[in-house]
Amino acid sequence: MELRTCRMCGKLYSYIGKMTPFCPKCMKELEEKFDICKKYIKENPGANIQVVSENTGVSVKMIKQWVREERLSFSDKSLVGIECESCGANILMGRFCAQCKQKLAGGLADSVRKPERPGPQPTQKTGGRMRFLDE
């Protein structure tokens, strides 16, 4: 167990191995804000991030982070202003648009695939019955 400083309140807390940079008290507050945002978006499907921020008191930056983490999503009617991290296209949730996801998946598959290399071929030397492998 190690001590860390909370990014929100600046207090020290015991880090137990969670992937969050916030103390338990601030995490609880963030989850409450998340629930408020989620409820507001459900009741107002045409709202954009700025409107949600103004009416819930949650920062635009935090809402965008939740959208990128795919915890929040907006309806197709919404004018969400979140951009694809690769090409800048307008997206409703996540970090990348469908085309960039496909390019990334294809590039990853290509890098994982092992190139086919022919193995050493056995050859016979003249004058004997022993076989040797050429390198």
Image (cartoon, rainbow, N blue to C red):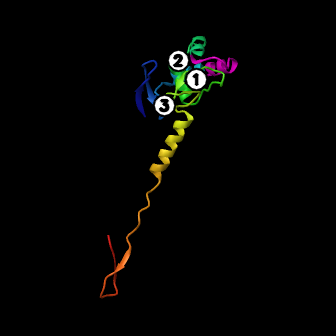
Q: Which mark is residue 78?
A: none
Kindly identify the residue that appears in the image at 68 percent across and 17 percent down: 44
Residue at (63, 20) in percent of width and height = 78
Name the kind of residue labelled 2 in the image. Val
User: Label 2 belongs to which residue?
Assistant: 60
58, above or below 15, in the image: above
Quadrant of the rendered structure where residue 93 is?
top right
Q: Identify the residue position indicated by label 1 in the image.
A: 31
Dot placed on the residue nearer the N-terminal end, 3 or 2:
2
Q: Residues within 10 Å of mark 2 (few under 14, many from 20)?
A: some
How many badges with numbers are in the image?
Answer: 3
Question: According to the image, label 3 marks what residue?
Answer: 87
| Callout 3 secondary element | loop
Residue 18 x, y percent position in the rendering: 49, 33
Identified by mark 1, the residue type is Glu
Q: Could you give the CA–CA distance between mark 3 and mark 1, rounded to whole angstroms?
A: 31 Å
Horizontal and vertical percent position of residue 89:
53, 28
Q: Looking at the image, can residue 20 be seen?
A: yes
Q: Mark 3 against mark 2, which lies toward the viewer? A: 3
Residue type at tag 3? Cys
Which residues are the magenta region?
34-49
Q: Name the residue located 41 percent from the left edge and 66 percent from the top edge.
A: 118
N-terminal-most mark, 3 or 1: 1
